[in-house]
Amino acid sequence: MKYFGKNTWVYFNGTFVKADRTELDLFGQSLHYGYSAIEGIRAYNTHNGTRMFRAEQHYDRLRCSCELVGISFPWKTDLLVERTYELLDKNNLRSAYIRPLVTTGQNMYLTPAKDSDIVIAAWEWGPFLGADLIRVTLSPYQRPNPSSLPPEAKISGQYVASIVATNEATQRGFDEAILLDSDGYVAQASSNNLFIEKDTVLYTPAPGAIFPGITRQTVLEIASRLNIEVVEKKLSPDDFRDADSAFLTGTATGIVGIAAVDDAVFPEEWTNTLGATIQRAYKNLTLEKENYEVII
């Protein structure tokens, strides 16, 4: 997939420039060490025009990610939101995936670079894992240890582990990898959070080793308003395999149902699951107003 053409605009350090005219710093720490922070935001074409879903929350998290690892972040959230809407308009995008990226300057030592840059790009992109039920596998690769990097920081270098795990899974014929944590409990997919359903209760891995996704938090809020019980706890691989149903959540993915993990097929028909109910509610929430009146 080609994300940018020669007429594509990106936002770079306070101005709009053509994507093919931006320059890559060959000596930047981001290139050499993965020392950068990323975000992902969705814009939806609603009845009230183009609308980003929880953009402020995403940009606040980008700031937090940078601060947690010592990357300078001098930009204000409200300005970034405003400029992102301008970027969508310049690229004639009504629905899009948006990728803010904070990169770091030149420094070959393993100390933080003083300078940082921000670039915001946007392109048309369907659901990351498609719209159909997917097949997943328990990966031989683990989620990075939370004692090595703050798990709530969305740092580019961490995604090397995700790429390796996904590549291994797809080579074996699966759609996605499910990573365990360093204690052998189920953590999350390569870039998505996990929920399972058992006996009309939802379970999801507790914070600690997982990335606390904004879509995950939205699902918890929806479940609360719909009186769906959710338990955050450590989940073993057997808990996962023995579930009635399961689904993944993430900004790029939205909510996608899981048909099977390895050779274990979930018995519940997806349309009858709590996940499907929340999937419908989430779609309404992103396409309408950021409240729950449209889903109750």
Image: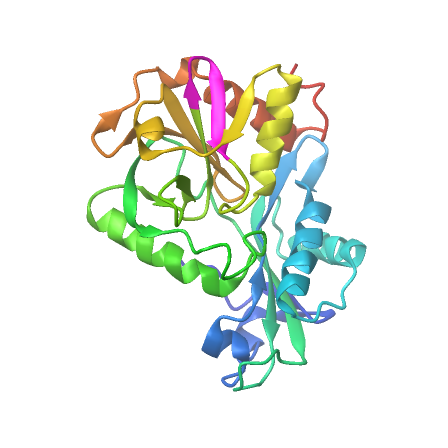
Q: Which residues are magenta?
A: 197-205
| Quadrant housing the N terminus | bottom left
- Residue 185, placed above or below residue 201: below
Picture coordinates of residue 117, whole percent (x, y): 65, 73
Q: Nearer the viewer, residue 123 or 141?
A: 141
- Residue 76, placed above or below residue 17: above
| Quadrant housing the C terminus | top right
Looking at the rendering, which quadrant does residue 162 occupy?
Answer: bottom left
Q: Is residue 294 left or right of residue 170?
A: right
Residue at x 46%, y 40% (from the top left corner): 127
Residue at x 54%, y 71% (from the top left corner): 35
- Residue 154, placed above or below residue 183: below
Picture coordinates of residue 41, whole percent (x, y): 60, 48
- Residue 48, placed above or below residue 119: above
Main secondary-structure element of the magenta-colored stretch: strand
Residue at x 66%, y 49% (from the top left corner): 58
Q: Is residue 132 magenta?
A: no
Picture coordinates of residue 47, whole percent (x, y): 68, 30
